[in-house]
Amino acid sequence: MPKYITRLPRARTIGGAARLKTDKIYLPNGALSGLSIDIHTSTGKTARGRTPRGVLIYRGCPIRGVDWEVRHEFADGTVVEGWHEHLWDDRHGRQVGVAFAPPWAMDNDLETLFERVCQHWHIQVGSRYQQRLREADRGSDGND
């Protein structure tokens, strides 16, 4: 089901980390979904610390996440190098994952990661009315 946010959040420094966070993700009917997104990077000196990470949260509990490691071994036996997505489950917690191949050259940019995870998790940027207008503009109605 497509969801939307009304605008991109502004980057802020919170607790020593650069962070983009939105707490209001809406369903198509305008109701709050209970979801939020937190994209962050620490100010640490390691490459992993500077690489942004993103988490999709449902009512305070993380349910999906995207991050980068040279090599990540998951509890279910999956091994992923580089960008990967964590998929939470009751048995393994966050230790289930799949490769995440972002279609862009990563330059440690919070805004780019925010936009890509929104696309990946079917969250549109803009109001439900703006999205309907954009969708209607894609095709021709014969009045050209």
Image (cartoon, rainbow, N blue to C red):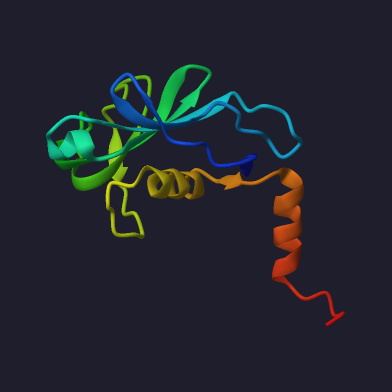
The residue under the point 73% across, 72% down is 139
Asked if residue 1 can be seen in this view, the reply is no
Q: Is residue 52 visible?
A: yes
Relative to the observer, which residue lies in front, 15 or 26?
15
| Quadrant location, the N terminus | top right
Q: How many marks?
A: 0
Q: At which x and y percent is residue 43?
A: 22, 30
Query: Relative to 4, does residue 141 appear above or below in the rendering?
Result: below
Which residue is farthest front?
Answer: 13
Which residue is painted at 44% across and 44% down in the image? 117
Image quadrant in which you'd find residue 44: top left
**Residue 119 placed where, x, y %?**
50, 50
Q: Left or right: where does residue 77 sit relative to residue 25?
A: left
Q: Is residue 28 left or right of residue 107?
A: right
Q: Nearer the viewer, residue 65 or 127?
A: 127
Extreme residue in the right direction: 143
Identify whether 139 is placed above or below 98. Answer: below
Q: Residue at x 52, y 36 (%)?
A: 9
Write down the quadrant of residue 127 in the picture. top right
Query: Residue 74, how many percent across, how many down?
Result: 20, 33
Residue under the point 36% across and 60% down = 103
Q: Residue furthest bottom?
A: 144
Vertically, is 33 above or below 28? above
Q: Quadrant of the C terminus?
A: bottom right
Left or right of residue 24: residue 48: left
